[in-house]
Amino acid sequence: MAVVTRFAPSPTGFLHIGGARTALFNWLFARHHAEHGDGGRFLLRIEDTDRARSTEAAVQAIHDGLTWLGLDWDGEAVSQFARADAHRAAAERLLADGKAYKCYCTPEELAEMRDAARRDGRKRMYDGRWRDRDPSEAPPDINPVVRLKAPQTGETVIGDLVQGQVRVANDQLDDMVLLRSDGTPTYMLAVVVDDHDMGVTHVIRGDDHLTNAFRQSQLYEALGHARPEFAHIPLIHGPDGAKLSKRHGALGVDTYRNDGFLPEAMRNYLLRLGWSHGDDEIIETEQAIEWFGLDNVGKSAARFDVQKLTNLNGRYIRQADDRALTDLVLARLTAAPSAKLAPEASDRLFKGMAGLKERAKTIVELTENSAFYAAERPISLDEKATKAMDAEGRRSLARMRDRLAASETWTEDALLGAAKEEAEASGAKLSAVAAPIRAALTGRAVSPSVFQILTVLGREQSLARIGDALAERPAET
């Protein structure tokens, strides 16, 4: 049997971290089985039946988030709302088979039932008063709902692939609504019909859906459909153990993309939120596909930690291809409203990337640290760089300009040698000699090696930037 999984988000907002992890686990499970000759398809269904809250912008955000993460789906995305006729047809068939019935309760009657159930401590809210009642007794002014005639004795048992065997007494479950009074299908009905019609073999989702699985299992049986395998994954909590929220960093995937996280780092981090393979921490996607299985999903809630994600992202940046990073940085610099880049920006960024990426944990940080390479002259100095250009700093820089200009070779070793000669001649520390050079070249007080920067910029650009800095009127003290 070919494995078919699905990701079925509601388009009512961004693609959040929990949803992204669910999508990843479904994608990996399908791709693992595809590679091992067991078929393996990953489907996308947009559960857009809540028309008041569903938006096209949210649908696009889901598509964009999955695409950025590299989670490609097979075939066209399915709109649940577009399948409403199939959902209604299933309910009508259950009515015809005597496995469902019309309920004519008024809103007041339902409210009384709920209150009574709460007082008595019962989970079952609906008392089944229209279950076997003659429809000829129906009041003329009530549009009925359609309810499933659920079993009232025994148990519903699920052999969950993560949670193990779970069960519920059937007398704890009501006869759930399948069609609302306006004829629209409910979530429960739509999910079961869609999963069956799409050939879904494995439903992998958060364990907040476990109670839904009992009701859906009853509906599968009533419809005569084979039940898929269920795998309910524990939810994600914050580092403090509380339910994940925005204060923990539970933002949309698009926010992490905009904040400079790499999709491969995000995939690796989400993979490790509730799944493990020994002590392995850095797991490339190809290896994840090879190793992934539901038997290694933990039963305890995973803890989301933005700092750990950020550190992992830094590791991925350090091992990333320099050209790919250059393209990412250049795109951000070009998009800046006040962008004024030198024609040589791309070449300089690429040459300097090896030194730059060692210090950055996000692409945003990498872009900020790289901007001086791409900038057109003259560059501006920040406050700390300006302090390095005091009277002594300017005198040191002027002497170093002459030494650099006289250097026969423009290599890191040769330029470092010139700086050491200046430090020895002036009785200053090498760091004191380097500080005004750094300020002149980068406009900042912190950067990669000054001598690496000199070689990346080249003789002409370096001397020109130093000349610009010396020509600036010193700040009054």
Image: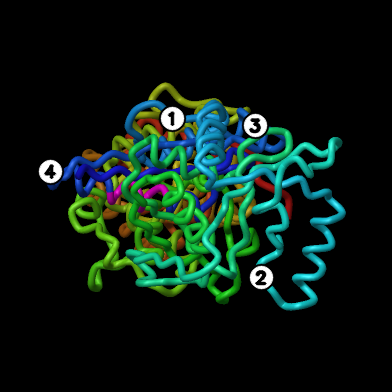
Q: Which residue is mark 4?
A: 37
Q: Closer to the camera, 315 or 195?
A: 195
- Whole-angstrom CA distance, mark 4 to mark 1, is 24 Å
Single out the mark in the foreground, 3 or 4. 4
Question: Residue 26: within the magenta?
Answer: yes
- Whole-angstrom CA distance, mark 3 to mark 2, is 34 Å
Whether label 1 touches label 3, CB < 8 Å = no
| Residue type, label 3 | Thr
The magenta segment: 23-29
For label 2, count other residues whose C-alpha is less than 10 Å away and answer few (under 14), some (14-19) or many (20+): few
Query: Does label 4 or label 1 sit earlier along the sequence?
Result: 4
| Residue type, label 1 | Ala
Question: Residue 381: within the magenta?
Answer: no
Q: Main secondary structure of the magenta part?
A: helix
Task: Give SS at disc 3.
Answer: loop
Q: Which residue is mark 1?
A: 77
| Residue type, label 2 | Lys
Q: Closer to the camera, 64 or 409?
A: 64
Q: Which residue is mark 3?
A: 55
Q: Residue at x 58, y 50 (%)?
A: 148
Name the disc covering residue 123, or none: 2
Whether label 3 touches label 4, CB < 8 Å = no
